[in-house]
Amino acid sequence: MLRAGSAALVVGGILALSACGGTEIGTQNNCTTSADCAGGDQDNDQGTTSGTSAGSPSFSGSASSSSSESSPSPAGESPLPGYGIKADRDAISLPKPDTYEPGKLDIDKIRTSRGGKDDAELVYESTWGNLQADSDAVIGKSSQSRPSVEECIQHAERGAIGELEASDLRPGDALCIVSADENVAWMRFVGRGSGSLPPLQFELTVWQRA
């Protein structure tokens, strides 16, 4: 299982993007007497810290969040050593599947395809129109706001799903994927085309190992 912590990434066995921030608010008093100043010092010591967490997945089930969440990283950077952003909120379309030729997403090569023998982490199969994990990848439900790479790994592990009906996806629903090569992707559903088993549009962020 792949685990992310504040200091290191631990990998063992087979592999199975909500940020928050606080603002410290204090007060400053003007005083003229020693008693007033003493009271003002006491008030200043009673600052407050506030923060909010990003929303949880909107479709059925939820992914657990890290108990120690981190602030968003600048675009192109990753707080987890060894990872860098290779795709930054890119628009992708998962192809409509044909008989015996599913639509595929390969996050290691950051490309989509239909059919063929190429490896893929996400497969859009043609029988029931389900989204499935493939090639030893792990896929889990994530938050609508892009998490950090550490949080995305945790979402993939803790909110892991075997498959998901594509027809159940609603705009804003998101998934996290961890590939067998330990690359990580967060993808948020944007919309779908027309017809039976239509192509699916996502916003994609990929973090890859250096």
Image (cartoon, grey):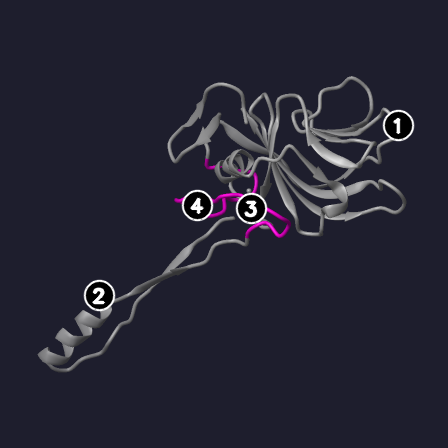
Residue holding disc 1 = 99
Q: Position of residue 3 (x, y in %)?
A: 45, 30
Residue holding disc 2 = 45
| Residue 125: numbered disc | none
Q: Secondary structure at mark 4?
A: loop
Residue 77 drawn in magenta: yes
Q: Secondary structure at mark 3?
A: loop
Position above or below: 176 against 104? below
For the residue pair 74 and 209, the one nearer the viewer reads as 209
Which of the marked residues, 1 or 3, is nearer the chain's N terminus? 3
Q: Nearer the viewer, mark 4 or mark 1?
A: 1
Which of the marked residues, 4 or 3, is nearer the chain's N terminus? 3
Tag 4: residue type?
Ser
Q: Position of residue 50 (x, y in %)?
A: 39, 61
Residue 186 drawn in magenta: no
For the residue pair 64 and 40, the one nearer the viewer reads as 64
Tag 1: residue type?
Thr
Could you tell me which quadrant the C terminus lies in? top right
